[in-house]
Amino acid sequence: MFQQYTKEFRYNIKLSVPVILGMLGHTFVQLADNIMVGQLGTAELAAVSLGNSFVFIAMSLGIGFSTAITPLVAEADGAGNKENAKKALKHGLVLCTVLSLMLFGVIMLAKPLMYSMKQSEEVVALAVPYLDLVAFSLVPLIIFQAFKQFSEGLSQTKYPMYATIMANVVNVIINYLLIFGSFGFPKMGIVGAAIGTLVSRFMMVAYIWYLLKSKKKFHDYVTGFNFRKIEKKVIKKIVNLGFPSALQMFFEVAIFTAAIWLSGVLGKNAQAANQIALNLSSMTFMFGMGLGIAAMIRVGNQKGLRNFLELRRIGRSIFLLTLLLEILFAGLFLLGRHWFPTLYLDLDDAMNIADNTEVVVLAAELLLVAAFFQISDGVQVVVLGALRGLQDVKIPTLITFIAYWAIGFPVSYYLGLHTDLGSIGIWVGLLTGLSASAVMLYLRFNYLTKKLIVNS
């Protein structure tokens, strides 16, 4: 029984590992920023958390939208239609560029909200200049996403990984030089971290384009674009897939952002602890995201081949692999919950010892809840990937809205601000929303694939 699923594990891992490493690359940019900035103090760490909360919301829309490119390219590749794959990339690039500039503008307009969110004045003052630069880094990041999703649609997952690794190295070097003022560079604190993020993301775009252009197999896909010839039909197809996908990611990221803001109401230490737990959780979440991309590619290919029995079997094999992996991560979080937070703070800093100790204790409590939502979070994102491969996006968008905002957020708000649970209550709400999402999305996949098999 299980062998029909486990025999797919090797190929699924081979396909998803470069995606996971690339996804982890984005998270390592945040990890490097958080660990280095954490050495400056809890106010600086909370400021990075607050600034990034605005960026994450916009980033979720951009990255979510770009995922529309992958199933279109995967389906075209499965059907052997190179022209359609190139059209998906060209039109995707145009839409991603326009969207990234719009999102940057929206963040700049939304910046004054920081002053009316009951956040610490010290934290807001530090967050504003940081946000200006990190918000602009969305432009190259979302353009990079278009190339990344195209490459993954052709089952070539290693090139985005190479570009992300390169960007990480650049980011860490610039962080080290500019946050602390090393080797005679100016000491810029968290603004130095923002410059590192901005420069590394521009280099990431240039490098992935160079990599793809240099390979004979991809050269014709990524060169010779005629941007004056834009087809409404292709734009409409990408928007119809991309907009609901963007909303799905937005609904999930927005509830985590709400958790950051609710934690900020509880104080800077609660917010710093939330940032640590969130950063650690987002790293393990990238494994689910990577497997979700693998599910989208493989389901998209089988859809192109119209082999729906195989499509269902392959989808379920990836769900099982994800479940086993996330149970392993849950165990790691339970075992390491007291040690992981100490990586982010300088516990030998005599001036801030009381704050730092409180943050470590709070973060350890949050990681106890995070251990359990690893499982729900991983499963829901992989099933969502499989549904995108089927190009089923509208009903899953409604499901994610109900799970996070009709179920999860009210629980977070009530338990976090109106009971003694505080930060833990906020995270119990996150766990509730993610679990509801995982169950409902799986039921949707089960229903659709049975229907496709019966009708084929």
Image: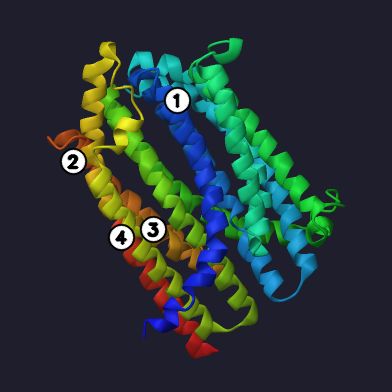
From this view, report whether residue 388 is shown above or below residue 163.
below
From this view, report whether residue 456 is shown above or below residue 242.
below
Residue 450 in sight: yes
From this view, report whether residue 7 is shown above or below residue 141.
below
Q: Amino acid at mark 1?
A: Met
- Split into 4 quadrants, where in the image is the N terminus? bottom left
Nearer to me, 293 or 396: 293
Q: Which mark is residue 36?
A: 1
**Label 2–label 4 contact, CB within 8 A:** no
Residue denoted by label 4: 327
Residue 260 in sight: no
Image location (x, y in percent) of residue 412: 25, 43
From this view, report whether residue 42 is shown above or below residue 332.
above
Image location (x, y in percent) of residue 202: 68, 34
Secondary element at image label 1? helix
Q: Earlier in the sequence, mark 2 or mark 4?
A: 4
Question: Going by the image, does 411 lie left or right of 316?
Answer: left
Residue shown at 58% from the left, 10% from the top: 186
Callout 1: few (<14), some (14-19), or many (20+) C-alpha neighbours within 10 Å? many
Residue denoted by label 3: 378
Secondary element at image label 4? helix
Q: Earlier in the sequence, mark 3 or mark 4?
A: 4
Closer to the observer: label 2 or label 1? 1
Q: Gap in Å between the C-alphas at discs 3 and 2?
A: 24 Å
Q: Earlier in the sequence, mark 4 or mark 1?
A: 1
Closer to the observer: label 3 or label 1? 1
